[in-house]
């Protein structure tokens, strides 16, 4: 019975129309993920109106493909520009860019691709096998479990900065301060909005990520270019010093002397 169901499912997936849809969705997700500031969620949102005119299987395949490809494509600007294309790529942007500067950019992209595929397949297998049990556990979560889950996340953030704990704690506190901007969750009371309605929704991750990585990298590149230009000017001045002109030899003698 299970083999027959799997055979039917594979026949639906490997239909030529579904494969063409997967290919087009992969190209679309690759483009969206490679642009800093555009996320996989945005790719899915842009693709949903198109899927209204598709049968169920191609529609689901297109959304899943675009999401997975957009998440991987976020590694491309991380490696070459030090600008994460998606929030998922922000964790290892500095390491990937450092590998690219050493001439190992293809290794960084290859590692991201391989482990993205492995993680996706493993997550899919776990979801197929344990989805009912995970749903039952999630339904039993209360405020106490969410509190300790948040504490675990904050503690993990500090443990990741063992080389410099003070920097990790300061970064954590700054992150909590930024996250507190907006409406209070239980009562809806505005916090740190300063009367600005635009801050009522809080500070979203995408502008913060672009400001931290993209703008800083642009300023760093401009400073590096200016440093190279000034160095080249100094080297040219040292190589070709200005010629001195003998004023006495070029001036004609006065007839009154």
Image (cartoon, rainbow, N blue to C red):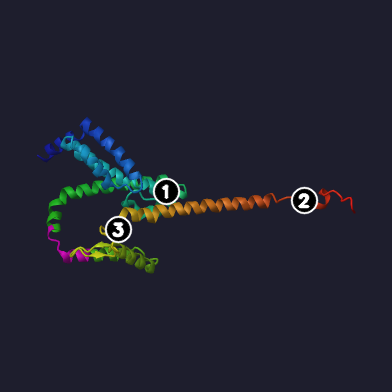
Q: Nearer the viewer, residue 57 or 133?
A: 57
Q: Nearer the viewer, residue 253 or 73?
A: 253
Q: Looking at the figure, which quarter contains the N terminus?
A: top left
Residue 46 in percent (x, y) is at 25, 42
Q: Please tell me which of labels 1 and 2 falls first in the chain.
A: 1
Is residue 23 rendered to the left or right of residue 93? left
Which disc is residue 245 wearing? 2
Q: Who's the residue at 20% across and 66% down the image?
A: 147
Q: Please tell me which of labels 2 and 3 falls first in the chain.
A: 3
Determine the CA span between mark 2 and mark 3.
64 Å
Occupied quadrant, residue 175:
bottom left
Q: Is residue 19 magenta?
A: no
- Tell me: residue 51, above or below residue 129: above
The single residue placed furthest to the bottom in the displayed view is 166
Residue labelled with disc 3: 203
Determine the CA span between mark 1 and mark 2.
49 Å
Is residue 229 rendered to the left or right of residue 107? right
Q: Is residue 140 magenta?
A: yes
Which disc is residue 81 wearing? 1
Q: Who's the residue at 29% across and 60% down the image?
A: 196
**SS state under label 1:** helix
**SS state under label 3:** loop
In the image, the segment drawn in magenta is 139-149
Q: Looking at the figure, which quarter contains the C terminus?
A: bottom right
């Amino acid at each position: 019975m299970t083999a027959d169901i799997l055979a039917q499912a594979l026949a639906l997936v490997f239909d030529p129309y579904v494969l063409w849809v997967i290919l087009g969705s992969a190209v679309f997700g690759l483009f969206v993920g490679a642009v800093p500031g555009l996320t996989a969620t945005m790719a899915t949102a842009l693709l949903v109106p198109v899927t209204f005119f598709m049968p169920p299987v191609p529609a689901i395949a297109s959304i899943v493909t675009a999401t997975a490809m957009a998440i991987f494509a976020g590694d491309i600007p991380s490696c070459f520009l030090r600008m994460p294309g998606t929030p998922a790529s922000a964790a290892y942007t500095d390491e990937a860019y450092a590998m690219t500067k050493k001439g190992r950019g293809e290794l960084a992209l290859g590692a991201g691709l391989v482990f993205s595929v492995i993680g996706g397949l493993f997550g899919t297998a776990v979801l197929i096998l344990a989805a009912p049990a995970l749903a039952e556990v999630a339904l039993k979560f209360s405020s106490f479990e969410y509190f300790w889950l948040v504490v675990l996340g904050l503690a993990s953030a500090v443990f990741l900065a063992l080389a410099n704990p003070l920097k990790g704690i300061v970064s954590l506190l700054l992150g909590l301060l930024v996250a507190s901007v907006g409406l209070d969750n239980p009562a809806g009371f505005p916090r740190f909005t300063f009367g600005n309605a635009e801050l009522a929704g809080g500070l979203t991750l995408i502008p913060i990520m672009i400001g931290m990585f993209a703008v800083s990298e642009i300023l760093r590149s401009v400073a590096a270019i200016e440093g190279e230009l000034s160095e080249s000017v100094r080297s040219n001045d040292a190589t070709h010093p200005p010629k001195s002109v003998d004023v006495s030899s070029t001036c004609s003698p006065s007839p009154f002397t």
